[in-house]
Each structure stands twice: as C-alpha cells, then as structure tokens.
Image: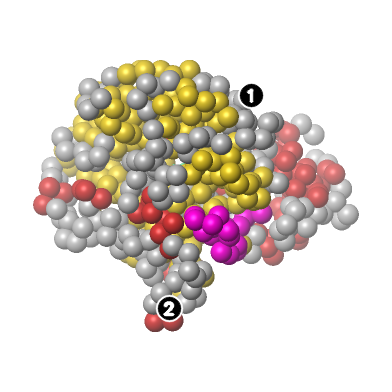
Amino acid sequence: MRPWLRNSLLAASCLMPGMVLADGIDAAALYAQKCASCHGAGRLGGMGPALLPENLGRLKPEEAAKIIAEGRPATQMRGFSGELSAEEVEALASFVMTPLEKVPAWGREEILASRQVLVRPDQLPDRPRFTADPLNLFVVVEAGDHHVTILDGDTFEPLTRFASRFALHGGPKFSPDGRFVTFMSRDGWITRYDLWSLQVVAEARAGINSRNIAISGDGKVLAVANYLPNTLVLLDAATLEPLEVKPVQDPFGKKSSRVSAVYQAAPRQSFVVALKDLPEVWEVAYSDPPPKSFGFVHSYEQGMVEGLDTKERFPVRRSEVAEPLDDFFFDPTYAYVIGASRDGRKAVVVNLDVRRPIKELPLPGMPHLGSGISWERDGRRVLATPHLQEAAISVIDMKSWELVKRIETAGPGFFMRSHENSRYVWTDASLGKAKDTIQVIDKESLEIEASLRPEPGRTAGHVEFTRDGRYALVSIMERDGALLVYDATTLQPVRRIPMNKPVGKYNVWNKISRSEGTSH
Ligand code: DHE
C-alpha cells in the first residue's frame, strides 16, 4: 500500500479505533500490544519517549521503521523484527507519524502529578563535591545515546556522565549562581540538576511537545514554551511547581498559537515570547508585583481590548506585527528584538516599549537569528547571524539596523560563537556539503581568517569557549564523535575528548555572565 494512502487510512483509524487496514493490519491494536507499555497508551510517552510526529522531529518514516525493526543502540528500545512482519513494522512506523486527532489536556494537574522531587534542598551539600572550578564546568548534551557529560573546563576531564531524558533540545538554563542547570526534552520533561553534588534534584513534565525554556534574571521562575498544548508554562525554578499555565491565544480567545520560543529579558524583568501562529510578540512580566506599564489598553485590528488585569501574577503585553515572527535576538537593553519572518526572507525589528515594528530588512536564506552573537566594532554594536539556507553570515548594525556586510561562507550553518577575550567568531557549515568545516572570522575586518576541517567528512558544529576564552571546544556531531579542543589564538587542536554525538555544550561562567559571544 502507498505510504500516503496508508497514512490517511491510519489517520482515519484514529477516529475509528480498531479499524483494520486493507492488508489486515490493525496498527492501533499492534501499538497497544507492542509499544504502549513503554511509550504510553496515548502515545504520550512513559518510560520511553512520546511517539508523536511533533516529538519525533525530522525522523523519516523509513528511519522510524528501521528503529522499530532493529532497535536503538545503547537504549532500552529493542528490535521487533523477530516478531513483526515488514508490513507490520511499516504500519507501526506510519501510525506513530500520524498526528493525534485531539491533543489531551496538559495543565496544572498533569504537571503536578508528573512532578518528582528526588533530593530536597536540605539534603544538598554546601560546597561542590569536587575540586574543579565550578564556574568553568561544561555541560555537554550527547544526543547519540541521550546522556549528559559534566566536563572540567580546565583539565577537560569528565566529572560524571548520566542518562538524560530522551532528546534534550536547546540551551539548558543555569541558576544565576551557576549551581543548578535545568534541561528540557522535546517531550516536555524539565530536569533540574545540581552541579555541586552531580545529581538530578527534581523533574516535572511541563508539556507534551516543548520548544525551549528560559529562566528569569533572579533565577526564580522558569518559562517553558510549548507546541503541544498551545501553552506557556511558568514554573517555580527551584521546585518545578507550576505557577501558571497560560493558554496562548489572541486577545479575543478565538485563535490559539504554538509557542516557538521563550527568551529571558533580565533588564526588563520579563520573558519575551515568539508565537508560531499569531502576529504578536508577547512580553510576560515575571517581577512581583509586575510593572505598572503592564496594565494597558490594547488596540487590535478588530477593536479594543480593555486594560489588562494587573492583579495577574504574569501579565502579558502584546506587540502586534504584520505576520508571525520567530527566532529572536535582542539588543543589550532588550528594548529591541529582531525576529525572522516565516518565509525566511526578511527580518523585522520590534521596539518592545512602543510595541510595534520599527524596521524591516531583507535577509533572505532563512536567517538563524537565535544563534546570532553581537560585539562592538568601530564603536558600533553589530549582530552577526548565520543562515539555515544560504552559505553566508549577515552582519547587521544594531543602531541603524542596516546590513553592514554579507560574508560568503563554505555552506549554510546553524551556530555562531565568540568570547569577549577572542578576536574571532567561529561558525559551522553543517547544513551543507562542507558539513565538516568550521570557519573563523575576524571580528574587526569581517574577513574569514581560517577554514578548519577538524575531522574530514564528519559533521562539525556548535562551538563554546572556556571561561577565559583561551580554548574553543568544537563538537564532532557523530555517534563516535568528540569534542575537539582548539587553542583559540593559534587555531590549533590540542585535545580530543570522545563523545557520543555531542550536539551542544555550555560553559557555566559564559552563561551566567551572559557573555556577549554566547546565546542567553
Ligand atoms: Fe535547535 C537551540 C529551535 C533543530 C540543536 N533550537 C534552539 C533554540 C530554539 C531551537 C528555539 C533556542 C533554545 C534556547 O537557547 O533557549 N532547533 C530549533 C528548530 O526550530 C529546529 C530548526 C527544528 C527542530 O527540530 O526543532 C532546530 N537544533 C536543531 C537540530 O537539528 C539540532 C542541531 C540538534 C538537536 O538537538 O535537535 C539543534 N538547538 C540545538 C542546540 C541549541 C539549540 C545545540 C542550543 C544552542 C546554544 O548554544 O544555546
């Protein structure tokens, strides 16, 4: 049977549970029999991850079929080829790639029920259980077998390695003192980890499919951006208790939206929220009480909305935009946010004080602004962003919001990194043919200083510096991959640390000091 036909039949079979396909395979029954005990009856996850197309990301149905047949190495997912026919495997793969007809509720009650405090605060030590500099640790997310390594940033020796939730994504967030780090998995699991005693202290599931998290400048509130359901969840950062589950809707409650991402804006004591399906940018105050400016009369194209109830703990202030914007970068005051249009052809600057767009600039090739970095050049602050679909870096003046230079690179890339103490910016070309290439750009001349091929033929990406900026750690994102430590001045490799598909790594000091060369 053609996959598209099977898919539509399977979608229909979700409406009519137990419906048997033309070739006699009841995928829903097969799922219940073989998969539900680990992945949950509703496909929402259990011991194993949620099996929903949104959570499986870019996994193709044929890859899903291979995993069902052969299992996943180094995980508890065993292969089923001995007990299922090829057709049954294919039917199951299509089944898990079919969206749920109705997204189940995931609100305060569900979050509370999922929450576990594994170590109470009074059980935690009052100093680190190791001699390494606790502010120069690296937290390394290894996607190959869903583990995290905590690495000493001076000796480059691992302190510990532990199993994480399935498919951690995006930047983990640190408490302001650098002691705790919080991870998010695509399945919505939030894990708080104590870096001093090297143990998980609390977990809760904040959504069914989540995008990213942000932590307030005072470290007290954690915000979780969800695709499923359409909510922004505010948690107590220490205990992971839900403080508020905010439905994300237009001012009239008629249309809801997925949340693309949430960002902290510490100088404004707020979170800034990118919405996937609504032409609005949200600012959510986390200060208690919220600033007076959050009580306002909102004009919307359909009419006026009365002043917000400022008694709300987390009031929302909306900036209207012409179309949904994604992937934000901020100026140092956080008054200005630059976001990408969904067609990937332009960027829009929004002033969060006057709550409207103030500038549009053409930026074709899907700029990846969220990975941008900024620095001072000739007395002006510039922002540099890679492009997901073009072999270029765009450098933008952050006052005039004009393009300063387009730097041609070896290929489209994902990430950029620098450090206050380094004259270079590092970027990858991991989305193109030259996926093994890292390029180093001079921050003053904006010329490419060097093109490195750390391990020819193997994907290189995501760079992070040591606390002092002396070394740059490059990920070789392969299952038998590594972190390669480069001298950040001579650009020579000095050390190789084997890792299982290390996607991202985060230096505690660079994160808590909000280094201008790293994402926040
Ligand atoms: Fe990411 C950060 C969205 C695919 C690895 N990614 C982020 C953030 C967002 C985002 C919103 C910011 C989080 C933060 O810091 O709070 N990522 C997206 C996508 O929309 C996209 C393109 C498609 C998707 O599947 O969601 C995507 N990302 C990927 C990958 O394929 C990567 C390479 C591997 C993976 O783990 O899935 C990947 N994303 C990362 C990493 C960061 C990240 C390593 C953190 C960057 C940092 O240094 O802070």
- Asked where in the image residue 157 lies, by quadrant, the reply is bottom right
The numbered disc on residue 33 is none
- Tag 1: amino acid: Lys
Residue 196 position, x and y percent, is 45, 69
User: Would residue 121 be seen by someone viewing this image from the given angle?
Assistant: no
Q: Nearer the viewer, mark 1 or mark 2?
A: 2
Q: Quadrant of the N terminus?
A: top right
The residue lying toward the viewer, choosing from 147 and 404, is: 404
- Tag 2: amino acid: Pro
Question: Which residue matches tag 2?
Answer: 125
Q: Secondary structure at mark 2?
A: loop
Q: Give above or below for 293 relative to 400.
A: below
The residue located at (46%, 36%) in the rendering is 489
Q: Give above or below for 256 relative to 322.
A: below
Residue 283 position, x and y percent, is 26, 45
Question: Which residue matches tag 1?
Answer: 433
- Is residue 206 one of those drawn in magenta? no
